[in-house]
Image (spheres, coloured by chain):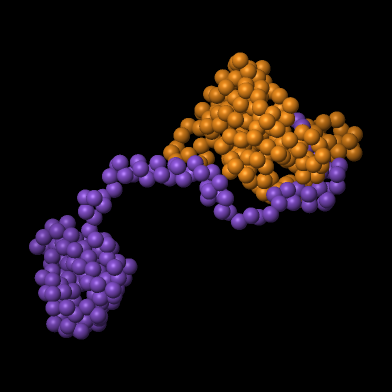
Amino acid sequence: MGAKERREVDELLRSVRFGGEFHVDHLHEPGLEASASELHLLVPHHGASARNTQRDILYIDPDVVLDELRAHDFQTVLRATMEQWSAHFADMATQLGVARNDALTSERLVTLESKVKLLEARVAQLEQRPEMPIRHLPDDGDPFALLRELKTELGEDRFRWFLEDE
Amino acid sequence: MAATVIRFDDAKNPPRTVFVDSSFIRALIQWSSDPGVASAAAAHGFYDRAKRANARLWTTPFTAEEILWAYVRRALQDTCRTYGIVSIGDLKRERRGDYARTIESCRPEILKMITALNRLKISFEFPGDQAAVRGTWGQMVWRAASQILDRFPIETADAFHIACATVGGTDHIASLDSDFREVDGLTIYCYM
């Protein structure tokens, strides 16, 4: 692999990598393997065979990505890769019992009107001045205590220097 | 037409945002040590009601500087007297070491006063400090102060305070200084 090609691959990997290796040792559905093999983006870890179904790490082989890049344009490969990862995450969430958000329907899409309503509600909430966040700040005691302490330190005369007008 | 004037005692419902000047803060400092002084008590009453109503009290850092400089100036004047020097300017020129030592000796009290001022929960900021977008705030203050000085017979420092307040979106000013009353469009909260 040449230097230019390596750079391209590095750039692509930076785009699709999710902070390092992704453990998928609990993902063994037949459908998942099929979809993975379609893109040839799943290869085994630690030098194991590509046919090894006991793969424990999901990562992207630069050489395979390069092949994909030769065959398709960058956006196609990237989109396909992201879809692949998205499917993996969805399956993993299902297996882990994590509730998954439904796709946004038109009703759930935040429209301009609903944004305005939210802002109006927020303004109405802020208008309730006693409930503004500052009311919940911890009370740090008497705000004048330090001034009294300073007066004790300085004495009456010197403390009054602060009170002199221009 | 002059400013609208409201006495501290009559301001039962303080505005949401008030610009305070150095005379108001001095009155609060005075109240801390001498709550019997009527003007200080009135200022503190207004301050207390404003804080309870979650009003925002703010001013510029220059207001704090006026209070801090008064202390340092007095210390320098004492040093001048010690050496029979007439002015601080002369002290600076003729006895630079004593000038510097005097300023240095004020540092602990100045730092403590800065902390005490922060405890009052009065925001020291310039107009536009909390703005979501970048603006030409300095130029706006400069123009506003120029217009105020052109129209009203007030001190330059007061003109710049008012300019900062109005550019910062506040025309409510708490002050024990009667000069602000000259400027129409303002609402002045005062002692008398």
- Image height of B102 relative to A48, above or below: above
Name which residue lies at 49% across and 41% down: A127
* Colour for chain B in the figure: orange
In terms of image quadrants, where is residue A49? bottom left
Is residue B157 in view from this perspective?
A: no
Where in the figure is residue A142, as x and y percent of width and height?
71, 51
Name which residue lies at 17% across and 78% down: A29
Name which residue lies at 63% across and 18% down: B2
Name which residue lies at 54% across and 43% down: A129
- Image height of B46 relative to A26, above or below: above
Residue B12 in the figure: left or right of residue A114: right
* Colour for chain A in the figure: purple
Q: Nearer the viewer, residue A2 or B129?
A: B129
Q: Nearer the viewer, residue B139 or A26?
A: A26
- Image height of B2 relative to A39, above or below: above
Q: Nearer the viewer, residue B54 or B116?
A: B54
